[in-house]
């Protein structure tokens, strides 16, 4: 008879299916997009949250303009989205591809996480810092 593979002790919660997290991200994103659809972040007086870094320091973070960018993309205003945040607009297809892979693997019943090499992580961080400096210098 084959030996049983020992399992880690239970932590008091059931193991989640690998598709739960990416589907939850989809649902949260869709809910956020639905709320944003009718709320123009370019106009004052909306209930959208402010960037914490900008609220405290007055500086634009690498993601500042992201809400306006998404609003403009949803309304077909690609030139306005480019002006809102070029870096996020260029990074969005890569993030979408990673989410799609995460979702597909989850639906297949496999847990997946991207392996990003340390040098790529440094490159991404350097680009974010450079973008922050550049947009706050103008």
Image (spheres, rainbow, N blue to C red):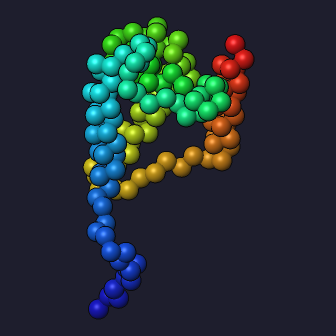
Above or below residue 83? Residue 7 is below
Does residue 19 lie above or below 5 as drawn? above
Work out whether 80 lies above or below 3.
above
Q: What is the quadrant of the N terminus in the image?
A: bottom left
Q: Quadrant of residue 102?
A: top left
Of residue 42 and residue 10, the one placed in the foreground of this image is 42
Residue 17 drawn at (x, y percent): 28, 58
**Res. 119 visible in picture:** yes
Residue occupying the point 30% across, 61% down: 16
Front residue of 66 and 40: 40
Q: Position of residue 38 (x, y in %)?
A: 28, 19
Taking 24 as reference, is 38 above or below it? above
**Depth check, front residue: 41 or 84:** 41
Which residue is painted at 28% across and 34% down in the image? Answer: 31
Q: Is residue 85 left or right of residue 110?
A: right
On-image quarter of the C terminus: top right
Tell which residue pokes out farthest to the front in this image: 45
Residue at image position (45%, 19%) is: 69
Q: Position of residue 22 (x, y in %)?
A: 34, 46
- How many numbered marks are there? 0
| Residue 127 visible in rendering | no
Q: Position of residue 15 (x, y in %)?
A: 31, 66
- Residue located at (32% from left, 32% from top): 32
């Amino acid at each position: 008879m084959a030996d049983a593979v020992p399992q880690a002790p239970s932590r008091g919660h059931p193991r989640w299916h690998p598709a739960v997290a990416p589907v939850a991200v989809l649902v949260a994103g869709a809910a956020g997009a639905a709320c944003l659809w009718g709320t123009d972040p370019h106009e004052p007086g909306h209930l959208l949250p402010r960037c914490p870094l900008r609220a405290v320091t007055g500086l634009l973070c690498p993601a500042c303009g992201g809400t306006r960018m998404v609003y403009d993309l949803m309304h077909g205003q690609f030139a306005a989205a480019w002006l809102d945040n070029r870096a996020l607009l260029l990074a969005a297809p890569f993030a979408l591809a990673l989410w799609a892979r995460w979702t597909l693997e989850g639906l297949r019943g496999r847990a997946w996480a991207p392996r990003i090499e340390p040098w790529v992580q440094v490159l991404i961080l350097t680009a974010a810092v450079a973008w922050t400096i550049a947009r706050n210098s103008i």
